[in-house]
């Protein structure tokens, strides 16, 4: 079947399944899950611990291959099947189009907060030299981290490291952003700041953003709310 997208989606998961374990211990994390991510939309995925939320995020973002189903993404005017790509093609696709926020921060210990963002811009060829530094400083300022730009992760709090990780995901203006518990290490004031930044990235820069969280306080900030439980996904009202 040729790859197609309709309804203005920029990324679509179709009939995704993913299981873990063998024999009697085999468990389904995803059971025939389908959803669309749209440009300019901030989506929230919630559900109990162990319900498959991180699995779905990893499958949609090209990090974990599904057992069945496919992930279609719009890239440079062409619709591509993410899991039909070669490993190199998929790596290149993620580098060019996708920003990630991981629970474990994944910061480089030897780099300052500013350098964590600069390196993303330089690796991807988005900016170099002074322009990369300017964009990195602008993002850190929006995250309330201007005074920490020269500090390395060992000298940052957990919340500060989380905000650096979020800045790194957004600094290249990606088409897709996948954020796993982006506010879990933050007080609510900084959590609100992060959600406003993610909402701006969606609404103003037309990114498609999926946030995984347990925090119901995020609901007023999002455009669509999905609930995943026992491997089954449903869209729910935000109210």
Image: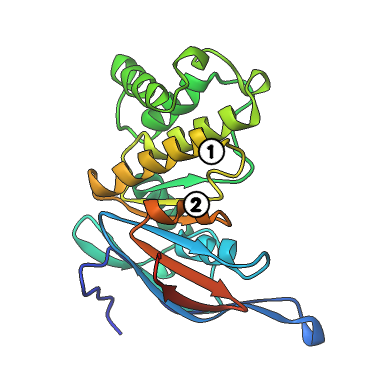
Q: Residue at x 46, y 77 (%)?
A: 234
Q: CA distance from mark 2 to mark 1?
A: 9 Å
Q: Residue furthest front?
A: 239
Visible in this render: residue 203? yes
Give the x, y percent position of residue 92: 39, 49
**In contact (CB < 8 Å): disc 2 and disc 1:** yes
Tell me which label, 2 or 1, sits earlier in the chain: 1
> Residue drawn at (54%, 68%), measured in percent from left and top?
65
Residue drawn at (42%, 43%) of the image? 195
Where does label 2 land, which residue?
217
Compared to residue 239, the image places residue 18 above or below, namely below
| Secondary structure found at label 2 | helix
Q: Quadrant of residue 173?
A: top left
Mark 1: which secondary structure? helix
Residue to which mark 1 is pinned: 188
Of 193 and 174, the residue lying toward us: 193
| Picture quadrant of residue 186 | top right
Foreground residue among 145 and 62: 145
Q: How many other residues sit within 10 Å of disc 1, few (<14), some (14-19) or many (≥20)? A: few
């Amino acid at each position: 079947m040729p790859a197609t997208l309709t309804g203005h989606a920029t990324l679509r998961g179709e009939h995704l399944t993913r299981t873990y374990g063998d024999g009697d211990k085999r468990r389904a994390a995803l059971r025939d899950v389908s959803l669309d991510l749209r440009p300019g939309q901030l989506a929230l995925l919630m559900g109990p611990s162990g319900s498959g939320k991180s699995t779905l995020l990893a499958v949609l973002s090209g990090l974990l291959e599904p057992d069945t189903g496919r992930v279609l993404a719009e890239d440079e005017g062409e619709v591509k099947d993410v899991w039909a790509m070669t490993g190199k093609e998929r790596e290149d696709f993620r580098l060019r189009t996708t920003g990630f926020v991981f629970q474990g921060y994944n910061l480089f210990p030897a780099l300052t907060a500013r350098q964590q963002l600069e390196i993303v811009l330089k690796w991807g060829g988005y900016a170099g030299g002074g322009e990369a530094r300017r964009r990195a400083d602008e993002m850190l300022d929006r995250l309330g981290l201007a005074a920490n730009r020269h500090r390395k992760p060992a000298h940052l709090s957990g919340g500060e490291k989380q905000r650096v990780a979020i800045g790194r995901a957004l600094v290249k203006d990606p088409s897709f952003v996948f954020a796993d518990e982006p506010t879990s290490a933050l007080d609510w004031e900084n959590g609100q700041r992060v959600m406003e930044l993610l909402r701006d990235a969606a609404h103003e820069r037309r990114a498609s953003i999926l946030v995984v969280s347990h925090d119901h306080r995020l609901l007023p900030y999002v455009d669509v709310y999905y609930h995943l439980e026992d491997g089954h996904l449903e869209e729910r009202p935000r109210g």
